[in-house]
Image (spheres, rainbow, N blue to C red):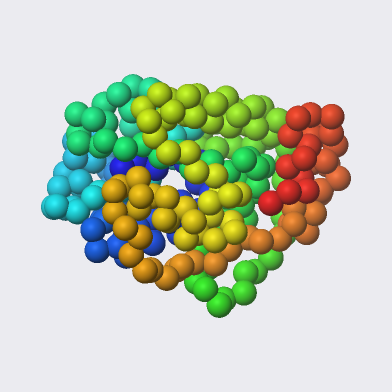
Amino acid sequence: MVILNSGRCGSTVLMRMLNAHPRVLSGGEVFMRYGRAYEGSPRRPDPLRYLRRDMLRAGRRHFVFSVHFLRAQHLRPDLVDVGLEAFMDAMPGLGVARFVLLERRNYLRVLLSSRAGELRELWHVPPGVPAELQTFAFDPEIVEIGVTRMRLVEWLEEFERGFAEARRLVAARGGLHLTYEEDVLPDPRVGYRKLCASLGEGAAAVEVPLARANPFAIREMLRNFDVVHRHLRGTRFAWMLDAD
């Protein structure tokens, strides 16, 4: 099973919960490990062969892995170098039979949560540990993801297009569409149970291993909230400033 997502959407907590299931092995972000292992190397193995070798560790268990699928993320030219549809078409040949899309509808919070994590150098918080507010200024005119720079509104349009394509491709393959807002935020066990059912397994009792790392309102996080508000005012993304 591959879980397609953008990051900062609950994928890690779901993957850790699945990894605690006796019939599942979580491979995590396979292509991120691939990139780190061969960074700067002139001779890199084929990334799909790297994935296949990782899958063999599962033995008779289900292997589940996560891919950040937007064009500036794991599938970008300097890493896996393949479009989303071609990537999904290649998966059955590797034994990947199930596709899941995990979408956080508030794309702005994905971007801001990523920036907060980079500044804190802390991406995940264990249960019972209070989250720490990280405040920062955010320039909506220059937002960088990987090696790509665009204006904030252009990135939100890119997320919108990317998820629209992913929803179409996953639905065409009989896959599962989860959302952060409905399947993770209220209780990650909701998404976990749906993933287990998609694998044809009962949901073994597991703990929720992580708490929210960034539960704060965007107004609290951004030192220049008014600047970002003006940038998004009048756009179809303005609602994201005041929502989870």
Q: Quadrant of the N terminus?
A: top left
Displayed quadrant of residue 128: bottom right
The picture places residue 57, in percent across and down from the top left corner, at 16, 53
Which one is nearer the viewer's eye here, 139 or 219? Answer: 219
Q: How many marks?
A: 0
Relative to residue 232, is residue 241 depicted above or below? below
Q: Is residue 183 left or right of residue 111?
A: left
Relative to residue 12, is residue 70 depicted above or below? above
Residue drawn 41% across the image and 55% down it: 193
Is residue 29 at least partly visible in the picture?
no
Is residue 64 at least partly visible in the picture?
yes
Q: Is residue 90 left or right of residue 181?
A: left
Q: Is residue 29 left or right of residue 138?
A: left
The picture places residue 62, in percent across and down from the top left corner, at 23, 50
Which one is nearer the viewer's eye here, 67 or 143? Answer: 67
Residue drawn 62% across the image and 40% down it: 105
Which one is nearer the viewer's eye here, 97 or 121? Answer: 97
Residue drawn 15% across the image and 47% down it: 56
